Image (cartoon, grey):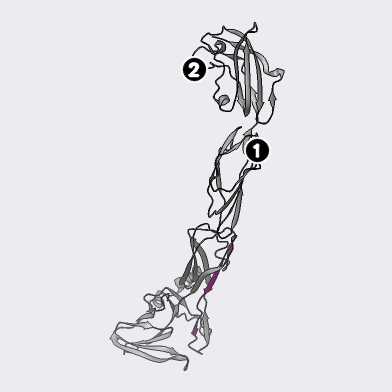
């Protein structure tokens, strides 16, 4: 619409555009008289948000030699003509009129020497209407209520007094601060979102018309919505795996944690939870607000690694930083015992432990029965027995073997 208005304006003679101007106006359109299609009188629009706006016109003679006499008239529906006298200014080159109400105006210009012309303009005071409010809300959605209206303006055909409508279109746009989800904010006047804000927001409705005037309305929305959220650390490890849960929920008042191993907690920040059995666990948090809004979240799987043993076949207890201990590399083990024998059948080392003792175990350092006597380089025999947290037993022949000690 604005593109075509610009084209029309460019096609109009420059002298016509400058004859009768309206200082302070927001837009200008042009008449379309059925009786005189070629006549394009200006229609000046003043935005009237404060409802105190008035119009103004300034007349200059397009031709002739000044000074001039300017006689102002206003359109009268009673006579269907510009017959309501307003004022006259004599012997001036420019004449202005301020504090004008809506209507049509004509100014007669003559120089007293045969030059005589009439200029016509129409004035409208435009005030679109907007009203933003809350239509409804539940724990799951927010519905907005909007009202949007624009003024309808009419002017007259000077030849027959016929009423003619000035084209005017309506647009609207919803927004919020801080930004939040509003589906189709410029298409649906009463939108409803199922992704409601978790913080207080100000919803605003902007209404504009094709005459470039606008109106805004807003209201503060105080959120009631909840969001279950938490952080898991760590997500994977060997048994027994100690996992911390950090609550990140919004408006949680009543809590229910389901840890996936048939245990629960009703604390907002539960203590460290221990998973003893290898496997995968999905944790679910359900929260309820003081207004009884409910939300829940289920985590990705927490992975507790299955039990396993890895037994080296050589070690070098020579004091350098590497490979100084013969130790079973284990995962998720509840219990481990290891016995080491020389080729002659003499027991040179033994260990048995679980829990913290097992976690702190370094292995055989190559000394006979934890003394200061170093075992000789060569082949040694081991017997390993172990039990995983997944109840897998490691006591078969595969866990009897040899290890080589090098110095």
Residue 230's place in the image compared with 223, above or below, is above
Residue visible at 39% across and 89% down in the picture: 73
Q: How crowded is mark 2: few (under 14 residues within 10 Å), some or many (20 or more)?
A: few
The one nearer the camera, 353 or 123, is 353
Q: Is the magenta stretch mostly helix, strand or loop?
A: strand
Q: Is residue 243 magenta?
A: no
Res. 229 in view: yes
Residue 302's place in the image compared with 107, above or below, is above
Residue with the mark numbered 1? 280
Q: In which quarter of the image is residue 344?
A: top right
Q: Where is residue 188 in the image (x, y as percent from the top left)?
A: 58, 67
Would you say 303 lies left or right of 99 here?
right
**Label at residue 271:** none
Q: Residue furthest bottom?
A: 79
Q: Position of residue 25 (x, y in %)?
A: 40, 75
Q: Residue furthest right?
A: 397
**Label at residue 321:** 2
Would you say 165 lies left or right of 263 here?
left
Quarter the C terminus occupies: top right
Q: Position of residue 330 (x, y in %)?
A: 61, 25
Q: Is residue 150 magenta?
A: yes
Count of numbered circles in the view: 2
Q: How crowded is mark 1: few (under 14 residues within 10 Å), some or many (20 or more)?
A: some
Q: Please, what secondary structure does the residue beneath circle 2 have? A: loop
In primary-sequence order, the first of circles 2 and 1 is: 1
Would you say 171 lies left or right of 344 here?
left
Q: Please, what secondary structure does the residue beneath circle 1 have? A: strand
* Residue range corresponding to the magenta coloring: 140-155
Residue visible at 44% across and 75% down in the picture: 28
Rounded to the nearest angstrom, the CA distance separating label 2 from label 1 is: 37 Å
Residue 249's place in the image compared with 85, above or below, is above
The answer to whether the residue labelled 2 contacts the one labelled 1, judged by CB atoms less than 8 Å apart, is no
């Amino acid at each position: 619409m604005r593109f075509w208005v610009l084209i029309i304006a460019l096609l109009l003679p420059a002298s016509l555009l400058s004859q009768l101007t309206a200082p302070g106006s927001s837009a200008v359109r042009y008449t379309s008289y059925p009786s005189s299609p070629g006549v394009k009188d200006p229609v000046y629009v003043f935005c009237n948000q404060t409802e105190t706006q008035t119009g103004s016109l300034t007349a200059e003679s397009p031709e002739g030699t000044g000074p001039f006499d300017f006689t102002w008239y206003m359109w009268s529906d009673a006579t269907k003509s510009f017959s309501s006298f307003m004022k006259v200014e004599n012997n001036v080159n420019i004449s202005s009129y301020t504090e004008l109400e809506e209507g049509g105006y004509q100014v007669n210009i003559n120089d007293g020497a045969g030059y005589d012309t009439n200029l016509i303009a129409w004035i409208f005071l435009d005030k679109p209407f907007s009203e933003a409010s809350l239509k409804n809300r539940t724990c799951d959605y927010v519905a907005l209520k909007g009202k949007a209206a624009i003024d309808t303006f009419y002017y007259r055909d000077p030849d027959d007094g016929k009423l003619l409508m000035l084209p005017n279109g309506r647009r609207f746009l919803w927004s919020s601060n801080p930004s939040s989800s509003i589906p189709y904010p410029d298409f649906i006047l009463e939108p409803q979102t199922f992704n409601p804000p978790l913080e207080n927001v100000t919803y605003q409705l902007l209404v504009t018309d094709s005459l470039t005037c606008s109106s805004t309305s807003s209201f503060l929305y105080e959120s009631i919505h909840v969001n279950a959220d938490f952080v898991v650390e760590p997500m994977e490890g060997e048994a027994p795996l100690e996992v911390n849960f950090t609550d990140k929920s919004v408006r949680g008042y009543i809590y229910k944690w389901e840890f996936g191993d048939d245990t629960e907690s009703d604390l907002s920040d539960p203590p460290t939870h221990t998973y003893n059995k290898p496997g995968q666990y999905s944790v679910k948090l359900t929260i309820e607000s003081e207004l009884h809004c409910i939300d829940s979240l289920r985590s990705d799987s927490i992975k507790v690694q299955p039990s396993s043993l890895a037994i080296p076949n050589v070690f070098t207890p020579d004091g350098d930083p590497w490979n100084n201990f013969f130790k079973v590399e284990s995962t998720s083990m509840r219990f481990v015992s290891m016995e080491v024998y020389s080729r002659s059948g003499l027991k040179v080392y033994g260990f048995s432990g679980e829990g913290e003792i097992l976690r702190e175990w370094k292995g055989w350092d190559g000394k006979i029965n934890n003394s200061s006597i170093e075992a000789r380089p060569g082949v040694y025999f081991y017997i390993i027995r172990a039990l995983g947290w997944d109840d897998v037993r490691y006591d078969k022949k595969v866990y009897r073997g040899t290890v080589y000690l090098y110095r």
